[in-house]
């Protein structure tokens, strides 16, 4: 069974600091890894999708890397803003996903 | 707008009642799935479908039934609600088996069983 772990569970940083969120998974035989953002009481918003053949994906201030051999992914958010405050979820799989419990980020103005 | 539509958004049930959570997508996606999200935990897979007429169990299927009579709809039925089923439920769909184009999630149904 695929186990997905996200560390830390919570993170508080001052505005402008770079964010580094970690995700690890136990089974490297994955089709893709996806990062989601979830605001309180809301649904999931897809941020970045990394297919198993890729090493990283970038979108604006966001960059996600994937190292299948070590079972790790890292989401970098550059120059954080208060609007980046949310819970970030990592998920791996194919048409069925295994999720981590998330990292709750607070960016202080 | 194209996407995944879930209804209702909120529901309160009494223990022992039954109900159906609706999920519909208009993107012609073959693959659909239901997840539940509990505080402090990631989403967990309840049931999934790989096409009309084909469903299978996920990680936490007990107490739930599904069917898929059309490509568009994938309802989730609670047979006899229990307080342990208090949760937020999300429906999701993807175009391909490898989800190479990602997933689309509904906005969720917040269910409370008293």
Image (cartoon, grey):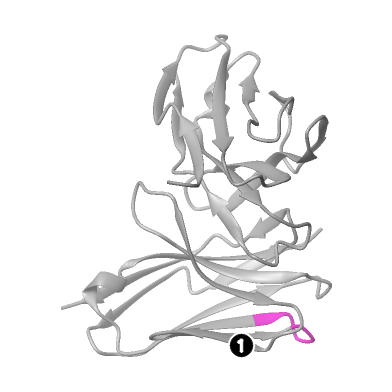
Residue B114 or residue B97, whichever sits in front:
B97
Residue holding disc 1: A56
Residue A53 or residue B18, whichever sits in front:
A53
The chain to which mark 1 is attached is: A
Q: Residue at x 70, y 35 (%)?
A: B71
- Secondary structure at badge 1 equals strand
Residue B79 or residue A47, whichever sits in front:
A47
Residue A12 or residue B33, whichever sits in front:
B33
Q: Is residue B58 above or below residue A59?
A: above
* Quadrant containing the N terminus of chain A in the rendered view: bottom right
Q: Quadrant of residue A6?
A: bottom right
Q: Is residue A63 above or below residue B80?
A: below
> Residue B100, percent across and down?
70, 67
Q: Residue at x 68, y 43 (%)?
A: B32
Q: Residue furthest left?
A: A109
Instruction: Point out the stretch of residues depicted in magenta.
Output: A68-72
Q: Is residue B18 left or right of residue A9?
A: right
* Quadrant containing the C terminus of chain A in the rendered view: bottom left
């Amino acid at each position: 069974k695929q186990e997905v772990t996200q560390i830390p569970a919570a993170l508080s940083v001052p505005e402008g600091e770079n964010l580094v969120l970690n995700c690890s998974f136990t089974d490297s035989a994955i089709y893709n890894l996806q990062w989601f953002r979830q605001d309180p009481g809301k649904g999931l918003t897809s941020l970045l999708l990394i297919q198993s053949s890729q090493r990283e994906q970038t979108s604006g201030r966001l960059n996600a890397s994937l190292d299948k051999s070590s079972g790790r992914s890292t989401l970098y958010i550059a120059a954080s803003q208060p609007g980046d405050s949310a819970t970030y979820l990592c998920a791996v799989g194919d048409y069925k996903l295994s999720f981590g419990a998330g990292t709750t980020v607070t960016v202080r103005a | 707008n194209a996407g995944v539509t879930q209804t209702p958004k909120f529901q309160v049930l009494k223990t022992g009642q039954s109900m159906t959570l609706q999920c519909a997508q208009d993107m012609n996606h073959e693959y659909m799935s239901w997840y539940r999200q509990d505080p402090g935990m990631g989403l967990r897979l309840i049931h999934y479908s790989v096409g009309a007429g084909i469903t299978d169990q996920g990680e936490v299927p007990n107490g739930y039934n599904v069917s898929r009579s059309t490509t568009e709809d994938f309802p989730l039925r609670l047979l006899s609600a229990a307080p342990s089923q208090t949760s937020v439920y999300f429906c999701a769909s993807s175009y391909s088996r490898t989800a190479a184009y990602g997933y689309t999630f509904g906005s969720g149904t917040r269910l409370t069983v008293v």
